[in-house]
């Protein structure tokens, strides 16, 4: 079991099977796989798009490049106004998302700390619950207003 | 605990493909420089995960599941003309799409519209990098792979918004606003539900979670039924799957953010929906269903096979909801995320934290989880029922007769107003 748990980094092949592994690289090893994956993903999409570009027919014609609205020519500007509730929702999301950034480290490590750390986070979550209740009461969560 | 097969390093031991790739890399290491072997190792990992996972799914679930089963649910035949039982339909679709002209309207922001599919699709490859297929089969065993997965899986929303914004079309813009609103609303309860999981297992590594579930001999779904339900609902909303696909609702806004896309670029968006659903299913089966472990069965059956089967079964759950549930309205979905799922996830977090404190303070053994599991299941049922009662989700609250616009909520859309 211990041997398995130490074989954390890398692939498809465990620690013991890596004679080429140099010490000191272990943390960034796994992230370089992420880099390679990014490049692979971009190449994958690029290939599909370029292949379509090469294979697909192309003809220029009037009316083909007009934005779709209902079959007629589009009326007015296409960037229309958007309701303000999207903005309120974004603010609410920011509050709760930043909160999770604080809770994640606590969730993993709080058992190693004294017990008051646990109660502190309860207070923190309680304050957030109050915030949610306030937003609820003010009607931010009502979509159809 | 002794796991003899985990330390067998024979290359022909296919219960863990890490042995095979390790043997290949050993040989390559003698002739190639370090960096190149490294890149080859990563590529082998991706090709293996593609062969194990994505290809059979695209071929069999992509058609036989996604289209045939849904067809059967809706009392019709699925595709049955191309190849045996219609299995070659996705290949025919891809060939057709690649030959279609990709139009870009003159009013559109050309470059953003070209980049949007790349931003949407590329993270799908990244997601599979951190999923453990077996004890030694992780392409990138990042110590914070849970947060990595959450971060990367919210990237496609950016791509969808770029697509909707750049197309310079009213329907696209509404679809883009809707998808962003949906994604950020459902992101919060999703992260909250996964906090409970991280808290209980005290790790942020997906591989670590599988080992934790293996050690206590109990899957996370039994310990955290609320978290599982919240995760499932949230992820099907974030993936724009049918109970929540208001971002591309055909009957309301033509095709949402995809209105102006055609040809292969549309195909990339469409095909990657399956890719993301698959990644979400794989993540759920890792976190909640024990990943590659199966109560000792993984000593005999290849662990990657167990993982793939679990993922496909979870994917069937997505199909089931997609085939049976009707589309919900946007106000219902938003209210459900903020008023139902988020308080429930917060309560779940508190319950789990209390249990963890009891577990560690009282120096109880791992066996205590078998006591926690029934408690949590009962608590989940009670909480869901009570909170639904408080919120007013009752059958008698459903309006019997259609309401007029002025009675509904008092909101009358202005001309061109952003619905």
Image (cartoon, helix red, strand yellow):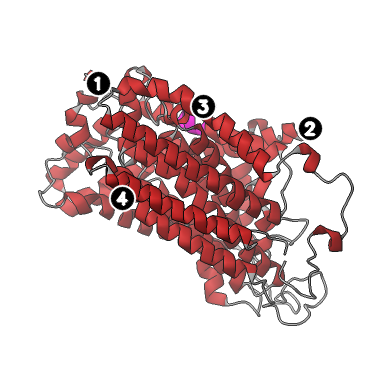
> Please, which chain is the residue tagged with disc 1 on?
B
Q: Which of the two discs, 1 and 2, labels the residue nearer the N terminus?
A: 1
Q: Same subunit under labels 1 and 4? A: no
Q: Is residue B331 left or right of residue A104?
A: right
Q: Main secondary structure of the magenta part?
A: helix
**Residue B70: assigned label:** none
Depth check: B132 or A11 in front?
B132
**Image location of residue B419, percent across then percent down:** 72, 66
Residue located at (61% from left, 50% from top): B339
Please name which of the two marks, 2 or 3, marks the residue nearer to the observer.
3
**Image location of residue A62, percent across then percent down:** 75, 79
Q: Is residue B325 left or right of residue B298?
A: right
Label 3 – label 1 distance at C-alpha: 34 Å
Q: Are marks 2 and 4 in contact (CB under 8 Å)?
A: no
**Residue B75: assigned label:** 2
Q: Quadrant of residue B199?
A: top left
**Residue A105: assigned label:** 4
Which residue is tagged 1?
Answer: B5
B161 versus B63 height, above or below: below
Residue located at (22% from left, 41% from top): A112
Q: Same subunit under labels 2 and 4? A: no
Please name which of the two marks, 2 or 4, marks the residue nearer to the observer.
4
Depth check: B317 or B343 in front?
B343
Numbered range of the magenta stretch: B308-312
Label 1 – label 4 distance at C-alpha: 34 Å
Note whether residue B140 is visible.
no
B127 versus B364 height, above or below: below
**Image location of residue A25, percent across then percent down:** 15, 52
> Please, which chain is the residue tagged with disc 2 on?
B
Q: Quadrant of residue B397?
A: top right
């Amino acid at each position: 079991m211990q041997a398995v748990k130490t074989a954390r980094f890398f692939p498809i092949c465990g620690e013991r099977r890596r004679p080429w592994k140099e010490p000191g690289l272990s943390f960034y090893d796994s992230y370089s796989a992420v880099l390679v994956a990014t490049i692979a993903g971009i190449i994958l999409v690029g290939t599909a798009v370029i292949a379509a570009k090469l294979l697909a027919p192309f003809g220029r014609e009037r009316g083909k490049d007009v934005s779709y609205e209902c079959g007629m020519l589009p009326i007015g500007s296409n960037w229309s106004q958007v309701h303000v509730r999207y903005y309120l929702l974004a603010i609410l999301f920011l509050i709760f998302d930043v909160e999770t950034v604080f809770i994640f480290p606590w969730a993993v490590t709080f058992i190693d700390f004294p017990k008051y750390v646990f109660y502190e986070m309860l207070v923190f979550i309680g304050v957030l619950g109050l915030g949610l209740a306030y937003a609820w009461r003010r009607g931010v969560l009502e979509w159809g207003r | 605990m002794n796991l003899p097969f985990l330390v067998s390093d024979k290359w022909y031991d296919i219960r863990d493909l890490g042995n095979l790739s390790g043997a290949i890399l050993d040989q390559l290491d003698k002739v190639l420089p370090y960096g190149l072997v490294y890149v080859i190792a990563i590529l082998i990992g991706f090709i293996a995960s593609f062969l194990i996972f994505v290809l059979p799914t695209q071929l069999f679930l992509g058609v036989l599941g996604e289209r045939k089963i849904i067809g059967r649910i809706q009392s019709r035949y699925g595709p049955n003309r191309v190849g045996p039982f219609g299995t070659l339909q996705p290949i025919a679709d891809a060939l057709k799409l690649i030959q279609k002209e990709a139009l870009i309207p003159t009013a559109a922001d050309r470059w953003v519209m070209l980049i949007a599919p790349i931003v949407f699709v590329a993270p799908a490859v990244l997601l599979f990098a951190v999923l453990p297929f077996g004890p030694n089969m992780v392409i990138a065993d990042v110590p914070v792979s849970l947060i990595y997965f959450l971060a990367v899986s919210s990237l496609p929303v950016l791509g969808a918004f770029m697509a909707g914004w750049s197309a310079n079309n009213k329907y696209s813009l509404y679809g883009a606003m809707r998808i962003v609103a949906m994604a950020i609303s459902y992101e919060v309860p999703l992260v909250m539900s996964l906090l409970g999981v991280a808290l209980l297992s005290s790790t942020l590594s997906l591989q670590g979670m599988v080992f934790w579930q293996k050690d206590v001999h109990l899957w996370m779904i039994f310990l955290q039924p609320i978290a599982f339900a919240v995760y499932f609902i949230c992820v099907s909303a974030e993936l724009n799957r049918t109970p929540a696909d208001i971002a591309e609702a055909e009957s309301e806004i033509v095709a949402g953010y995809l209105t102006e896309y055609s040809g292969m670029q549309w195909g990339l968006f469409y095909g990657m929906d399956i890719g993301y659903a698959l990644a979400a299913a794989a993540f759920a089966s890792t976190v909640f269903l024990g990943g590659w472990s199966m109560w000792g069965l993984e000593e005999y059956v290849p662990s990657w096979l167990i993982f793939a089967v679990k993922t496909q079964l979870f994917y069937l759950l997505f199909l089931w909801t997609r085939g049976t549930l009707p589309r919900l309205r946007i106000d219902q979905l938003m209210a459900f995320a903020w008023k139902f799922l988020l308080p429930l996830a917060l309560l779940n977090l508190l319950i789990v934290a209390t249990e963890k404190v009891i577990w560690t303070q009282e120096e109880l053994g791992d066996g205590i989880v078998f006591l926690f599991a029934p408690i949590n299941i009962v608590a989940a049922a009670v909480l869901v029922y009570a909170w639904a009662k408080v919120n007013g989700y009752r059958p008698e609250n459903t309006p019997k007769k259609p309401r007029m616009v002025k009675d509904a909520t008092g909101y009358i859309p202005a001309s061109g107003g952003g619905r």
